[in-house]
Image (spheres, rainbow, N blue to C red):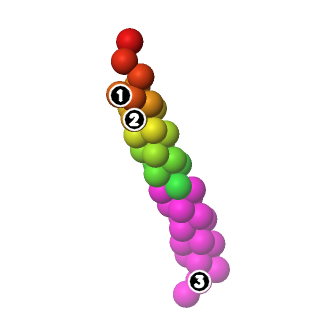
Amino acid sequence: MSDGLFAAFDIGLVFALAFGVGIWQLIVVRRSIRRDRDREPD
């Protein structure tokens, strides 16, 4: 495996991990907001 390809793969892996965690956090936050909204009637 060439160094450039390995570096690109490494960076892509880190970005994919960060992107996945960000999406997961967004889903969790939206879910908790919806739960709080359902719990408190306006």
The reply to whether callout 1 and callout 2 are in contact (CB within 8 Å) is yes
* Residue 31 as seen in the image, left or right of residue 19: left
Q: Secondary structure at mark 2?
A: helix
Q: Earlier in the sequence, mark 3 or mark 1?
A: 3
Disc 1 crowd rating (10 Å Cα; few below 14, some 14-19, many 20+) is few
Check the image and name the residue furthest to the top.
Answer: 42
* Most common secondary structure along the magenta stretch: helix
Q: Residue at x 54, y 67 (%)?
A: 13
On residue 38, which mark appears?
1
Name the residue carrying label 3: 2
Using the image as rendered, state which of residue 21 and residue 35 is in the foreground.
35
Check the image and name the residue furthest to the bottom.
Answer: 1
Depicted 31 relative to depicted 42: above or below: below
Using the image as rendered, state which of residue 35 and residue 21 is in the foreground.
35
Using the image as rendered, state which of residue 19 and residue 12 is in the foreground.
19
Using the image as rendered, state which of residue 14 and residue 21 is in the foreground.
21
Q: Give residue 29's position: percent from left, percent from top.
A: 49, 39
Disc 3 crowd rating (10 Å Cα; few below 14, some 14-19, many 20+) is few
Q: Give residue 12's position: percent from left, percent from top.
A: 54, 64
Q: Give residue 36's position: percent from left, percent from top.
A: 44, 30
Q: Amino acid at mark 2?
A: Arg
Depicted 30 relative to depicted 9: above or below: above
Start-end of magenta stretch: 1-20
Disc 2 crowd rating (10 Å Cα; few below 14, some 14-19, many 20+) is few
Q: Secondary structure at mark 3?
A: loop
Task: Please tell me whether mark 3 or mark 2 is closer to you in this view.
Answer: 2
Name the residue carrying label 2: 35
- The reply to whether residue 19 is in sight is no
Quadrant of image for the N terminus: bottom right
Q: Amino acid at mark 3?
A: Ser
The CA distance from mark 1 to mark 2 is 5 Å
Q: Give residue 20's position: percent from left, percent from top.
A: 48, 56
